[in-house]
């Protein structure tokens, strides 16, 4: 685990043993059953890992949130103005199949159980992908998840509205079953204490809007986390997850990937490796991994 600190040394590293001591007296507010419910497919997280990794992190973030809330109140007192509550925004980045979704759900649940910030919302950037019809028209279906496949203007506007204190902001909904945006469906975000934004390239700074000021998604973050692992491990996890989906989600008649449910295990393994080689692994190396050192914390 790596945490950014001021120069002259850009990072400080912790072993697992060192990090778990930072938990201090933070109580464990999750049960083994809740961890099981929150974890993703083929993600073998344990209650012990929650105690050793997530609890110290939730304590660190709670301290950060409290400091920012105090600063906001102090600034309002100085200006003699009452300003709307502005959410503390945490960005979570990392590769496909690295465990971002499980990490985000567990962190959301733990942070929501701190008394000082009970409302914690979670939004994924999948909802800000262009619809499939737009991606097809632009020849980008094979580059879904790459920076150019996102409606960056819409995502930046969502975060700008959120940070300006707007009472309700809406995030589009994405279906992993149909592999597309769900037309007409939105998630309403109503001034939470904390917003967690999880996505592949939320720390990416190489693509900005063509006109207007150069504003990036990460400009709105108060804290950012990169979920890291060796590519060989992520590739193996991706293939294992693909094989699991072949027997589960892919069999749903509504699934965009139902054609893969009929593949034999060797055929499915070859297909998964092909997808990793041509899409997900390429995106990791070209666009996601280079953003790792832009995070405040690397896990």
Image (tube, rainbow, N blue to C red):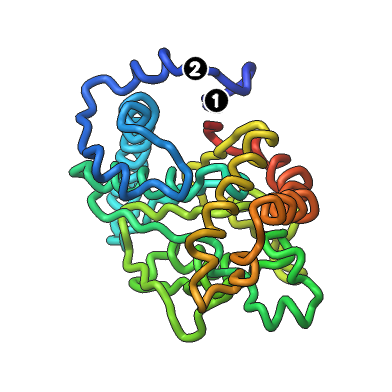
Picture layout, residue 113 above or below residue 215: above
The residue closer to the viewer here, 185 or 254, is 254
Left/right of residue 81 with respect to residue 280 in the rendered view? left
Secondary element at image label 1: strand
Picture layout, residue 228 above or below residue 176: above
Name the residue located 48 percent from the left edge and 44 percent from the top edge. Answer: 42
Q: Is residue 27 visible?
A: yes
At label 1, counting other C-alpha atoms closer than 10 Å, the crowd grade (few under 14, some 14-19, many 20 or more) is some
- Tags 1 and 2 in contact by the CB under 8 Å rule? yes
Name the residue located 32 percent from the left edge and 63 percent from the top edge. Answer: 191
The residue closer to the viewer here, 62 or 96, is 96
Picture layout, residue 213 above or below residue 8: below
Query: What residue is disc 2 on?
Result: 14
* Image quadrant assignment for residue 146: bottom right
Left/right of residue 281 with respect to residue 252 in the rendered view? right
Query: What residue is disc 1 on?
Result: 2
Name the residue located 38 percent from the left edge and 49 percent from the top edge. Answer: 105
* Image quadrant assignment for residue 111: top left
């Amino acid at each position: 685990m790596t945490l950014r600190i001021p120069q002259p040394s850009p990072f400080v590293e912790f072993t697992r043993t060192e990090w778990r001591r930072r938990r201090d007296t933070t109580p464990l507010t999750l049960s083994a059953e809740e961890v099981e419910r929150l974890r993703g497919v083929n993600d073998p997280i344990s209650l012990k890992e929650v105690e050793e990794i997530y609890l110290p992190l939730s304590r660190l973030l709670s301290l950060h949130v409290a400091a920012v809330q105090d600063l906001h109140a102090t600034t309002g007192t100085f200006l003699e103005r009452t300003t709307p509550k502005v959410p503390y925004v945490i960005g979570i980045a990392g590769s496909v199949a690295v465990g971002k979704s499980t990490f985000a759900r567990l962190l959301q649940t733990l942070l929501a159980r701190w008394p000082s910030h009970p409302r914690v919302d979670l939004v994924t950037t999948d909802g800000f992908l262009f619809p499939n019809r737009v991606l097809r028209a632009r020849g980008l279906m094979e580059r879904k998840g790459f920076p150019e496949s996102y409606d960056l203007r819409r995502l930046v506007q969502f975060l700008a509205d959120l940070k300006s204190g707007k009472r309700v902001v809406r995030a589009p909904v994405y279906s992993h079953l149909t592999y597309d945006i769900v037309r007409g469906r939105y998630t309403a975000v109503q001034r939470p204490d904390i917003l967690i934004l999880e996505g592949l390239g939320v720390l990416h700074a190489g693509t900005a809007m063509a006109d207007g000021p150069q504003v990036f998604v990460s400009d709105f973050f108060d804290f950012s986390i990169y979920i890291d692992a060796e590519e060989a491990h992520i590739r193996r996890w991706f293939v294992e997850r693909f094989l699991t989906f072949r027997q589960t989600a892919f069999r749903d008649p509504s699934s965009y990937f139902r054609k893969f449910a009929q593949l034999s295990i060797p055929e499915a393994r070859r297909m998964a490796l092909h997808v990793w080689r041509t899409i997900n692994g390429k995106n990791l190396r070209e666009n996601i991994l280079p953003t790792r050192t832009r995070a405040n914390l690397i896990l």
